[in-house]
Image (cartoon, grey):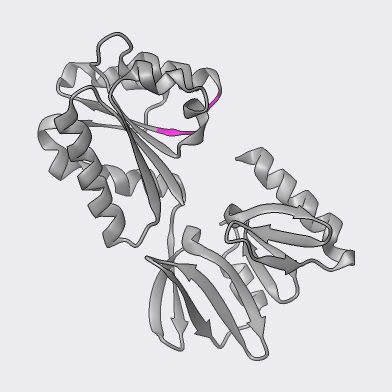
Amino acid sequence: MLKFAVCDDEKYYRDRISVLLAEYLETRSIEAEVDLYPSGKEFISEQENLVKYDVVFLDINMEEVDGIRTAMEMRKYESTTTIVLVTAFISYALEGYKVGAVRYIMKDALEVQLEECMDTVLKKMQFRQIAFSFIEGEKALYTDNIIYIESRRHKCIFFYMEKQRVTYQIYEKLDSIEEKLSGYGFLRTHKSFLVNMKHIRKISNYIVTLDSEEELPIPRLRYTQVREAFVAYKGEM
């Protein structure tokens, strides 16, 4: 699940961005949480906010602590958070280069610019879709929404999160699917399981625990390799 924050001292724009963002995410079946903050001062007062969000929309022109200063506080912690600056004045746009903002959007063009902005943001985050020919039909899946894939006899089952958890089945070898998903953060924890590392909560005692509370086995001979791969992945995030 992606985590978003919208920080703007004008309630109208705070709420408007939130609504447009929710509509965008719903049409793409992307699970997300969106938190709202009325000021940069309030946002940075909780230190965990500086690193916990995937994407933060920041109004540049806020009183006391403006969007640029808020973003600078985030970058002090080498935050990998994607920053989108929101402004009513085109002259402020260049300020974004100081804090590595991926985009800026104008307040008088939110309806037009937010969708295109989010397309860019998700592309930057490698939030991709890959198409598979399932028994249920051809379908493009968001890679982040794939929890894990299990091989059962002559077919593989995708455990996938949309508005609710669903499964898709395909007549294809897990080796082939693993190759297709190479580079998207998937880990072969067992000959029968390919797991999305974004959904792994912990690995211990030859068990991988997912954020869904499910537990999947890891063979003893594969355990060290799996654990090292997961530690390396967490270190790169």
Magenta segment, principal secondary structure?
loop
Q: Is residue 189 above or below residue 5?
A: below
Counting labels gives 0
Single out the residue that lies furthest toward the left.
108
Q: Residue 84: x and y, percent?
A: 32, 32
The image quarter in which residue 69 lies: top left
Q: Nearer the viewer, residue 211 or 234?
A: 211
Quarter holding the C terminus is top right
Q: Is residue 52 left or right of residue 116?
A: right
What's the residue at 46%, 52% (across, down)?
1
Asked whether residue 139 is drawn in magenta, I would say: no
Q: Residue 181: x and y, percent?
A: 57, 65
Q: Residue 37: x and y, percent?
A: 32, 28
Single out the residue that lies furthest toward the top.
64
What's the residue at 67%, 75% (across, down)?
175
Q: Residue 137: x and y, percent?
A: 39, 85
Q: Is residue 43 above or below residue 228?
A: above
Q: Which residues are magenta?
A: 78-82
